[in-house]
Image (tube, rainbow, N blue to C red):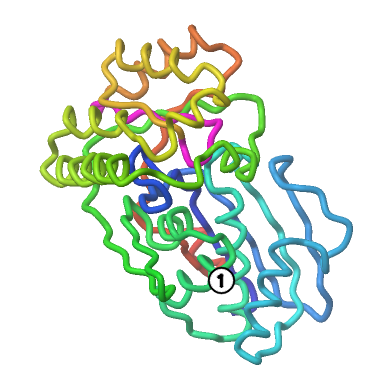
Amino acid sequence: MSKFTITIPASSANIGPGFDSFGLSLGLYLRLTVEEQDTWEVKQLSNLLPAFDSYENHFIYMIAEETANHFNKQLPACKLTIESSIPLARGLGSSASAVIAGIELANQLSHLDLSISEKLQLATAKEGHPDNVAASIIGGFVVTAYTENETIHYCKLDSLDMDMVTFIPNVELKTTASRNVLPEQYSRKQAAIASSISNLFIAALINKQYDLAGEMMEKDLFHEPYRSSIIPNYLAIKQKAKQFGAYGTVISGAGPTMIAFVPSGSGEQIVGKMQELFPSYLIQKLEVDNDGVQVSTNKEVAE
């Protein structure tokens, strides 16, 4: 392919009790239009992308080069035109989407023919946990397990009959800062209770018992109690969203964005009510992306 497009969806992770395990793919996107040429060129068309001074220092290029080198392949030169609707450092998987973009870029340019499992393994090695990257690679709601021998297992749940509403504040929160507030250890009793909450949450989702799922997602013990103090309007957003009919509202990833799971068809109405109460936020109903990373030719994009 001399010209093609790579599209990677945003993601929310943790989803309450699924710390470093649950991921949800959302309808915000990082897009790379790729044109093969003799020299490297990177052009960014969005202010939601970090600044760079040369293509060698561009994060996506560095991931692509590293991936090609890992398989002893050459990375051919190309022109990258990059667009993004995923805000940086907001808990919506901007870093994960960039990692996947680099891996898929190498996959296409160097003809690596990577499987989903191989992409997931490479992306997890860079991110440190599989929740965001699994959702953006596979799409939908994905449950992952990263075992001690670094094997990644995953299961994609059927589509959720709910609307998703995100509350994105105009402040950034780095993942490292959000992780620093977490405890180093949990007692056996804490771990047992937290695990049972997570188990019941997933069972309720599968059975479409969304009231129960919402209750369980708000009872997390792994990370939300520790991060709540550094998330703006944490309690106020949860309480008001519940008042307007949300099943449950949780921190998206490491924050500061929050995401509410609400009855299907009620998303736009809840957005309107919540926007009046939190005017400084970007509040929007987002679709669940069930496709994950996609590669298309220029002709397919036009159609």
Q: Residue furthest top?
A: 277
Position of residue 301 in the picture relative to residue 117 (left or right): right
Between 136 and 121, the residue placed more toward the observer is 121
Residue 263 position (above or below residue 173): above
Badge 1 local density, few (<14 within 10 Å), some, or many (20+)? many
Count all numbered tags in the image, as a single digit. 1
Looking at the rendered structure, the secondary structure element under dot 1 is: helix
Say which amino acid is labelled 1.
Answer: Glu
Q: Tell whether 142 sits left or right of 118.
A: left
Q: Which residue is mark 1?
A: 104
Quadrant showing the N terminus:
bottom right
Residue shown at 18% from the left, 42% from the top: 200
Instruction: From the viewer's side, name the closer residue of 170 and 31.
Output: 170
- Residue 285 in the image, given as x and y percentages of width and height: 41, 29
Part of the protein shown in magenta: 252-265
Q: Is residue 75 above or below residue 93?
A: below
Residue 256 horizontal/vertical position (percent):
56, 31
Q: Is residue 264 magenta?
A: yes
> Horizontal and vertical percent for residue 133?
48, 59
Image point 52% across, 16% down: which residue? 233
Furthest residue in direction right, as rendered: 53
In the rendered view, tell whether residue 221 sits above or below residue 297: above
Question: Percent position (x, y) of residue 46?
Answer: 71, 44
